[in-house]
Image (tube, helix red, strand yellow):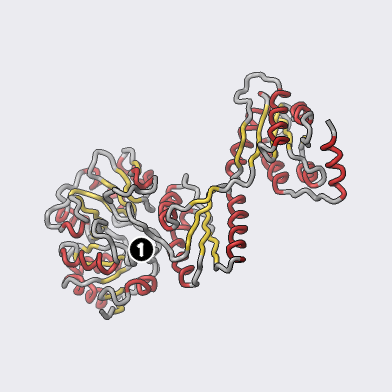
Amino acid sequence: METRYLSCSDEDLREAAGIIARGGLAAFPTETVYGLGGNALDPEAARRIYAAKGRPSDNPLIVHISDISQVESIAAEFPENAKKLAEAIWPGPMTIVLPKKDIVPDETTGGLKTVAIRFPADEAAQKLISYAGVPIAAPSANLSGRPSPTRWEHVREDLDGRCDAIIMGQPCVGGIESTVVDMTGELPQILRPGLITPQRIEAVLGLPCSYDPAVLAKPSEGLIPKAPGMKYKHYAPKADMTLYRGGRDTVARRMEADAEALRAEGKKTAVLVYGTGREAAERLFADLREKDDEGTDAILAAALDEADPVAFSVMNRMLKSAGYRITEVHDMRIAVASDHGGYELKEIIKKHLLERGFEVLDLGTNSTESVDYPIYGEKCGRAVASGEAERGVVCCGTGIGISIAANKVKGVRAAVVTNDYMAEYCKLHNDANIIAFGGRVISPEDALRFTDIWLDTEFEGGRHQRRVDMLNALG
């Protein structure tokens, strides 16, 4: 098959629409990713889409419309809440699942009795659907399992010679596929996360919106997919991809170390780090394809903070891209302990250490009720001296008493820190393996800064090693 390359001019869009109306396939841009379009009401066109993509036939297609009024021609029901959601968000990157009418063939819906409907925001897509005069079934315009295309050049890589036409539009601004929300039940449920977040849906409907369990874990073998992207391997580059999850700094160090090791083995290795979920959404698929074009053997990618709903949506794609291969990174274990006077500061430091990617061993106390600081100072000291933890942080009212208690344990070098200089030099010259803070003496902001300085400083060794050896011999 010879693939025609068309522009977004009205003349070319009408030509592409005619191809679709006659049962052919045309790839076109949307605001999310490029779609491979065929007549949604034609079973043979649906079969051609599956064949062109190499897509399993039980993986449902999304039906694209150019006006909300067209929903009732293909959906058996259009409940009030679904209509309210559509009117608030369409045209846009959201797909609504509703019971289907018989006019929509099973080939389009993957055998389901529901239909997934979307009204795209892209002007060229809207014109194409309108000119075709039929709703257009369109999954992403890539070979099944490959990263979704966000540029027409990506479509050419996968589908040249496999479809009748490719419309050469602008790069897609969204970067990931639409949010798919099931509106067939009493409450909305997201089947595939996207740029339209649960919070946005809840704000429109005033109802709680949840994720389908299949979104939150690796899909089971027997899963019947209710939406695209739920069951099969998706978005995968040719390179082996691994995600690294942990604190930002710890992950960065581990990825660079692993990348160096892979390069030493002769493997071309790329490292991907995104600052925000929005940045990742815009760049991920294009980056994966770029690395394939460069002949990359291994891709190491930093996991995103899934507390951000957009980052969560992108992580859904990243997990599938990596085949759920995740490396959990803990640079070291740090013991924390306090008495009642340092409890609140200890909790703040503990949270900070976890965010940086360290494993934390909390030895107490766990309340603000009066306790004896020597108990907790000794606990932390013994954990560090025995190797149960590599380092420790202790807190009491002034930091003094609990540091003395820790120093009673042989092999411990606990230092009270009250400024930046002390934070650096207690490690640089004394190789302090425990630092102590006063919860009633310094601010949490200062304590966190001192902790970071201490953690990021290396022992200088040299002439200082002799003195550290002398300290270790005491007790």
Seen at 43% across and 51% down, the residue is: 310
Q: Is residue 459 left or right of residue 380?
A: right
SS assignment at label 1: loop
Question: Which residue is the site of mark 1?
Answer: 33
Which residue is outermost to the top? 370
Q: Compared with residue 380, is residue 332 higher up or lower down, i.e. above or below? A: below
Q: Nearer the viewer, residue 243 or 71?
A: 243
Of the pair 302 and 103, the residue shown nearer to us: 302
**Whether residue 415 can be seen here:** no
Please tell me in which quadrant of the rendered image residue 31 appears.
bottom left
Closer to the camera in the image, 140 or 144: 144
The residue nearer to you, when weighing 297 against 28, is: 297
Question: Where in the figure is residue 451, as x and y percent of width and height?
Answer: 69, 41
Q: Is residue 441 left or right of residue 238?
A: right
Seen in the picture, residue 135 relative to 350 is either above or below; the reply is below
Image location of residue 42, percent across then percent down:
15, 64
Q: Horizontal and vertical percent for residue 195? A: 38, 53
Residue type at mark 1: give it.
Val
Viewed as shown, does residue 106 lie left or right of 253? left
- Image quarter where the C terminus lies is top right
| Residue 18 seen | yes
Residue at horizontal 22 percent and vertical 66 percent from the top: 129
- Could you say where residue 307 lies in the image, as x and y percent from the top left? 47, 44
Categorize mark 1 by other alpha carbons within 10 Å: few (<14), some (14-19), many (20+): many
Q: Is residue 120 left or right of residue 421?
A: left
Q: Quadrant of the N terminus?
A: bottom left
Q: How many marks?
A: 1
What residue is drawn where x is 30% and y is 65%? 35
Seen in the picture, residue 182 relative to 285 is either above or below; the reply is above
